[in-house]
Image (spheres, helix red, strand yellow):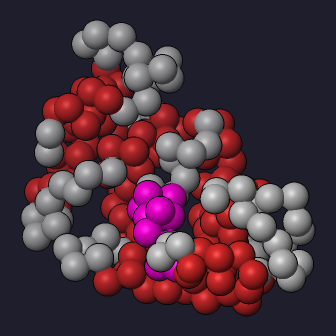
Amino acid sequence: LTVNDVNRTDRTNRFYEGIDNPGLVLLHDILMTYCMYDFDLGYVQGMSDLLSPILYVMENEVEAFWCFVAFMDQMNFEEQMQGMKTQLIQLSSLLRLLDLAFWNYLESQDSGYLYFCFRWLLIRFKRELSFVDVLRLWEVMWTGLPCENFHLLVCCAILDSENSTQPCGVSGSTCCLS
């Protein structure tokens, strides 16, 4: 665990701002405890981003720790990142189904593997959305409704919003990313 990751996490949020902030101390302590709890995995970059909203909401070290453990189990972090590879394949398949023209464009630009979505999936849009929006989105995702892979639909919605003025699925749509 690097202290730098903790020190960079959500510093504009009142819960974490300032020098010698007790929220940062709790964030660090929970991550250190998790490293001992899951010694084989240890610390992986991005964990502080995942823990921060949980700690903010729970405001309790023990409850935040156990919620984080459950979240990490759900996130399926592992060294080989097989779960992440599977999600990227599923996202590509979903995007291909929803907007073949856009998917073909990405393929033609050697972006069909959607690696640019990696961070979205890894930390569940934590750096793409405002803190308040992350709290709302995560609350919905944690319900498991409308489906287990709702985060993949969110990815498609983000991609669709960046995909020119054409609605999703319209043949011949152009991409604003070009």
| Left or right, 137 with reference to 73 | right
Vertical arrangement, residue 143 with respect to residue 8, above or below? below
> Which residue is painted at 28% across and 10% down in the image?
19
The x, y position of residue 115, in whole percent, is 44, 69
Q: Quadrant of the C terminus?
A: bottom right
Residue 29 sits in quarter: top left
Magenta residue check for 33: no
Instruction: Determine the main secondary structure of the stretch shown in magenta.
Output: helix
In depth, the one of 3 and 56 nearer the eye is 3
> Which residue is painted at 56% across and 81% down in the image?
107
> Which residue is painted at 69% across and 70% down in the image?
156
In depth, the one of 77 and 63 nearer the eye is 77
The x, y position of residue 22, in whole percent, is 31, 20
Q: Quadrant of the N terminus?
A: top left
Magenta residue check for 115: yes
Work out which residue is located at the far top of the displayed protein and give it: 19
> Which residue is painted at 41% across and 16% down in the image?
17
Vertical arrangement, residue 167 with respect to residue 47, above or below? below
Does residue 70 appear in the picture of this structure? no
Span shown in magenta? 112-122
| Left or right, 172 with reference to 28 | right
The x, y position of residue 99, in whole percent, is 76, 80
Vertical arrangement, residue 10 with respect to residue 102, above or below? above
Does residue 125 appear in the picture of this structure? yes
| Left or right, 23 with reference to 150 | left
